[in-house]
Every structure is written in structure tokens, then in C-alpha cells.
Amino acid sequence: MDRDLLRQSVGYHGHTLFSLLKCEQQENPAFQCIAGDLSRTVQYRKESKVENVAVQQFIAKKADLLFSPSWQSSTPSVKEETEDMYAVMPPLEQFMEVPGDDRRNLFFRDIERGDVVIARINSIREFGFFVTLICLSGGLGRYIEDLEITALCPLRDVPTHGNHDDPLSYYQNGDLIQAGVKDVDRYHEKLTISLQPSSVPPSFSHLKLGVIGVDDMPAHYSRSVAVAGSTTETYEKVLEHTLGFANPSTVEFLLGKLGISETNPASLMRGLQTKNFLKEDYATSIRKKQSASWALKCVKIGVGHFKSGRHVEAMNEYNKGLEIDPNNVEALVARGALYATKGSLNKAIEDFELALESCPTHRNARKYLCQTLVQRGGQVEEEEQLVTAEGLYRKALALDDTFEEAEEALQKLQKHIQKSLKLKEESAKEEKDMSKNVETSAEKLRKLLKEEKRYILYSLFYPMEPNDKISFNLPGQNGNSDVLFVYFG
């Protein structure tokens, strides 16, 4: 365990944290080795009246992970860093209407020894020089030029340069300098800065202390100045116009800078301390659950609108939920019910069927789909689309063979179909009989004409006397029959 870091934590939180650590880490050999040193740290600490017990319990429980010197998954990569590698933004507070007094209080609350600031010299005295702070450089970026916060750089913290016997002779009013914070008096809001390399931690050792040029100013400062001079800039606009925001390697670069591996991320959850996680254990499945929860909230709001008769608002909420989670069963069922209420039965059927594809056991989806299929079947039956109606009724029964409405509608339709078929058969038979009768009458007429022709020929060759009789054999419907002709003269 990191001895210095743990000592600082116990020195801040006091005896309560130390007691919790002894309870939680009593079997940790690394803690046992430094327990005596921590005990002496607690003895010289003044107790604070305000303590956050929940935070102390968390620290004590996770101490072996929090203070482990090898918590990082990998060694931080050393890459040449430019402002185009990732989006360097002005402080978020610049896009918010935060009063100056509040910003000043936040600055003195957050500033710590070892932070790096950039300032402008405004007064040089024999004991040092005074500066006006412009911004924070290393670590947390903050624009503070408008707050007019001053700080003192004592003579002993000004290194000698070359042949200058007087260290202060190297500096002039108006010079920009970069320095480390040496001391902070939060109560009186006073700062002391230093140009000595020992005033900054090793992580900031690459920063140049002393006089700097305008080109050495951090990127967030120049963008802060641009935002401060404009009333139309928004956080989104500045972010989108930042070249580093479009860098496809942004995430990879930032993870490497922190020494965090994508395949073995650092975590304080002990269950995540393993390696080689499966793909389904990452963000995809978690995001799916989050989307489903968010979509259900939209459905709940939509149902409230529906009950109050606000159908347009309800439909908007259902559509919003399905945009978040396209396969959300509850949203599909709710929207399908609204479609059915408004008479859009085909759209309602589509939503209910999609819901059943995602969850075949959903009772309401099955119930509403059966009812809508029967209702739609009744519509097409009135339009004499009997085959289509029969298919809808059978589909409803396939989903629920105990659905009485579908069974009754199907039986009624089948009787209707049988009656229609019977009427068609009778009509066809009548048409056939009529055709046959017409054919028989025509044949009979042809026979009469033929016999009449024979009679005429006979009379020409055999003159008849009054009351002479001639018999002809003519075909009839029930067989042949004799026809008697009598000549009366």
C-alpha cells in the first residue's frame, strides 16, 4: 500500500477512518506494516467536527485497492501530446452564469499545494513580486483572469539566473510567469507561489517554471478568452469545432495517457478485478437494460396521457420510447392499443405481432392481437372478402383456441359461406335447365317445320278430299307422339 498517500488520508479524516481501517484491513499484511506509523499520525491531528462517515467506510473497505501502487492496468504511455489529440475545452463554468463571488470561493476551495498557475507580474518589491493569476496550467483547467486574484512570490522562491546577482532583476512588470502553488490561506484568501522546481510534484516536472511567452499558454486559456468575448458561443458549438473532438483515436489516447487498458479496465469493484471479460459483459448489455428502463418511463407517461384523452401526446411518448428501445414490448403493446382505438387496425396488428416476436408469452399482446384480428375480420367480411376474413379468424384461434369471439365469428362466417355456395349452385342449375329447355323447344320447332315441309310435298303429289286425315309421328319431351292432320277443304 502507498504509505504516504494512506498517511495523508488518515491525517485528513482522523481517528474514525483509522478505526475503520483496522477493522476492515486487519488481515492485510501491507496495512499491518504501516499501522504503527498511521497511529502516530492520528495522535497529532486535530479532530474535525464534520465527518463524512459514508466516505470513510468506503475508503476503509476499498483501501487495498485505493492505495495500491499498481492499481493501473498498464504503464502510462508516453506520447507526444498536442491539443489536437483530444478536445481541450474551456471550463464548463464559463458557459454557465456563475457569479464571480461563487467562482472565487470555488477556486480557493479547490486550489492545493503543488498546483501550477500562470500569472502576470504587476509589482516588484525587494522581498519578492506580486502577480495577478490568469489561469491554472497543470491538472484542472480554470480561467480566473477576471477574478483579479493576487499572489506573492517571495524572494527566496525566485531562482538565480546566470550573472544576475539580484534574482528579481531578471523580471519586469507585465511578464507572464508559470509557477507552483506553495502555500494556501483559504480563510484570508491569500496565495504564495514559487518558481523553484521543488514546488511542483513529479507529475508536473515537465512544465517550465518562470517567464513564459504567449505561445506557451495552455489551449484552454485561448479558448476561454474567445468564449469570454462572445455571447453566442455554446459548449456544443465549441466542442464540435475542436479538431481533437473528431480524432478517431481520442479514447485510445486518453486511456493510454491514464495507463488504463480497454480489455482490463481498472475498477474498485472486486468482481471486476478479473481479466478476459466476455463481450456480453461490457457496455452493450448494460446499455440495453438502461434503454429498456428509459423506454418504460416513456410508456408510463404515455399511458397517463392516454387515460386523460390526450392521444397525440400519448403517441409521441410511445414513439419516443421505441426510438430509445425499438423492441420494447410494453411500448409496442401500448402503441398498438392506441392504434386500435383510433381505428388503424392494420398498424395495431403489426405492433402486437412485433411484441409477440420479442416476448411470445406476453399475455396482453396476445389478447389484444386476437381481439384486433376479429375486429379486422368483421370489417373485411362486410366488404364481402370472406376468404380474407376467414384467415383472420383462424389466425386469432391459432393464437388462442379458447377465444370465443373468434370461434363464433368463424362459425357464423362458415354458415354464410355455405349459404352463398348453395345459392350459387341453385342459380347455376336453373341456368342450366333454362338452357336445356331452350334447346328442346328449338329442336321441336325444327321437327315441325320438317313435317310441314313433308305435308306440303305430299299434298302436291296426292290431292286430298275434304275430311281426309294424315297422321305424323313427332318427337316430344316424353317420347314420340302422333299428330293428326285433317283436311277440311
Image (tube, rainbow, N blue to C red):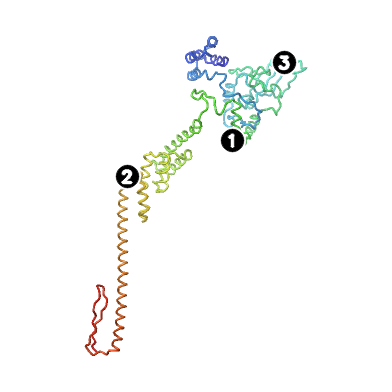
- Camera-nearest label, 2 or 1: 2
Q: Nearer the viewer, residue 336 or 258?
A: 258
- Which x, y percent locates residue 406? 33, 47
Q: Is residue 298 left or right of residue 131?
A: left
Find numbered disc 3 in the image and state the secondary structure of the residue it sits on.
loop
Q: Is residue 19 above or below residue 486?
A: above
Q: Earlier in the sequence, mark 2 or mark 3?
A: 3
Image quadrant where residue 234 sits = top right
Relative to 250, is 120 on the left or the right? right
Quadrant where the N terminus is found in the figure? top right
Query: Can residue 16 be seen?
Result: no
Answer whether residue 461 is visible to the viewer in this image: yes
Marks 3/1: CA–CA distance: 45 Å
Which amino acid, by three-letter code, is at mark 3?
Glu
* Front residue of this view, candidates 39 and 468: 468
Give me the residue at 51% from left, 32% from top: 279
